[in-house]
Amino acid sequence: MRAIEYSVTGDPEVLTLVDRPVLDPGPGEVRVRIHRSGVNPTDWKSRRGGAAGAAVDPPQVPNQDGSGVVDAVGRGVEAALLGLRVWVWEAAHLRPAGGTAQEYAVVPSRHVVFLPDVASFDLGASLGVPFLTAHRCLTVTEDGPARLGPGTMAGRTVLVAGGAGAVGNAAIQLARWSDATVITTVSSPEKGHLAAHAGADHIVNYRQQDVVKEVRAIAPAGVNTIVEVSPAVNGVIDVQVLARHGAVAV
């Protein structure tokens, strides 16, 4: 099968197309015929490493996220998974041969999630790192929900930093789905449109507006949860808009 791998750290030119054997799944594993491979910052940061030119042995097949169809299952895995459309998360974590940048990926069965027919493979490949991160950020508040869903964040206010980014956009969608009031910051009208399409109730352009003033006008008592992507830059703002018992999730 065709696969992408790298055996040395660096920029995209270290990626090579190779032929690898199709592996059989072991106990507790499934094999997924990959339709789409998702690329996240964690993928290219790992590829770059601490410095260019460091050896990677064994070679790494990159990309944590993806989507496809289960075509084989290992011992101890329900045969009912065969043929199911799934999305995959953390396929490459501590697994050099497991990334989704290949035609077939073998991963632990708990790392695949059913993908309904109404959801595209493109959508499935975009869920893993961004949406799992966003979900975690929204469920760490002291008195907030442990799981998300309609009504679970009713009466709560969430501030999402960088609502046009992958994690920020996912956080807006999940918080709005859970009935929170969602405020987000963006740097341009174009990014504001992306955040609005995701479901943000209030959009603050931090290049043109006073974020603290705008957020306090919307939530005088402060916000319950802040999904933060740039704490070094926004820490001073976060302190001024956070409600009592609120949480900043980075």
Image (tube, helix red, strand yellow):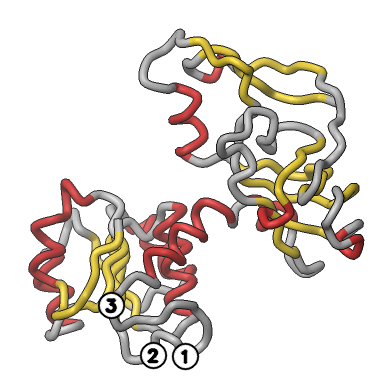
| Residue 138 on image: x %, y % | 38, 70
> Which type of secondary structure does the marked residue at label 2 adopt?
loop
Residue receiving disc 3: 142
Residue 136 got which mark? none
Residue for point 29% across, 62% down: 249
Mark 3 vs 1: CB contact within 8 A: no
Q: In this rendering, which labeled residue sits more in front, label 3 or label 1?
A: 3
| Residue 58 on image: x %, y % | 63, 17
Residue receiving disc 1: 151
Residue 154 got which mark? 2
Tell me the amino acid under the disc marked 3: Glu
- Relative to 244, is 35 on the left or the right? right
Q: In this rendering, which labeled residue sits more in front, label 2 or label 3?
A: 3
| The quarter of the displayed image where residue 82 is located | bottom right
| Residue 21 on image: x %, y % | 85, 24
Closer to the camera in the image, 170 or 31: 31
State which quarter of the image contains the N terminus. Answer: top right
Tell me the amino acid under the disc marked 1: Gly
Q: How crowded is mark 1: few (under 14 residues within 10 Å), some or many (20 or more)?
A: some
- Relative to 245, is 57 on the left or the right? right
Mark 1 vs 2: CB contact within 8 A: yes
